[in-house]
Image (tube, rainbow, N blue to C red):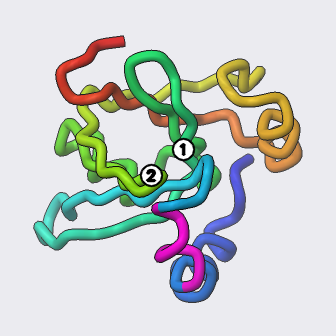
Amino acid sequence: MPLPRSVAHFNRFATNRVLGPLARYLPNFGVVEHRGRKSGRLYRTPVNVFPRPGGCTVALTYGPESDWVKNVLAAGGCSIETRGRTLTMTQPHLVHDESRRDMPAVVRTVLGLGDVTDFLALDYDGVSG
């Protein structure tokens, strides 16, 4: 089971305000920029992001039902700021992987402790994979 929604609520109002400005520059972190499905409002959500051939994978620590995930899926993409660069991402799709095989070993262990098994795979704009 992913982290409880109460942790997500706390992070949204506390941790994200501290981590948000730094996440764009830290390794394995990034900020997903996406639009609300109904409101059209622009949102910025700090995430754990890991490169893969042709794109990146985002660990869904709160599960695939998070609003930001639904927004990205509905829009067919997003942009991610990571390591000081802004990347346009397309072809979002959910991946369920109980072995967490695409994650680095240390991250695989940490995600295992949190029982995180869902990921969002995204392709670089114009690249399929």
Q: Estimate the x, y position of residue 90 in percent, counting from the top left.
A: 24, 32
Q: Residue 80 or 112: which is nearer the viewer?
A: 80
Identified by mark 1, the residue type is: Val
Measure the C-alpha gap from mark 2 to mark 1: 8 Å
Classify mark 2: helix, strand or loop. Answer: strand
User: Which residue is at a point 71% across and 41% down the rendered structure image?
Assistant: 116
Vertical comparison of 19 with 109: above or below: below
Is 86 included in the stretch rendered in magenta?
Answer: no
- Residue numbers of the magenta segment: 18-24
- Tell me the element at label 1: strand
x, y percent for residue 49: 54, 44
- Residue under label 2: 82
Choose mark 2 or mark 1, whichever is in front.
Answer: 2
Mark 2–mark 1 CB contact (< 8 Å): yes
Left or right: 62 in relation to 65? right
Q: Give the left or right position of residue 84, taking residue 98 as reference.
A: left
Residue 85 position (above or below residue 119): below
The foreground one among 5 and 126 is 126
Q: Residue at x 74, y 47 (%)?
A: 1
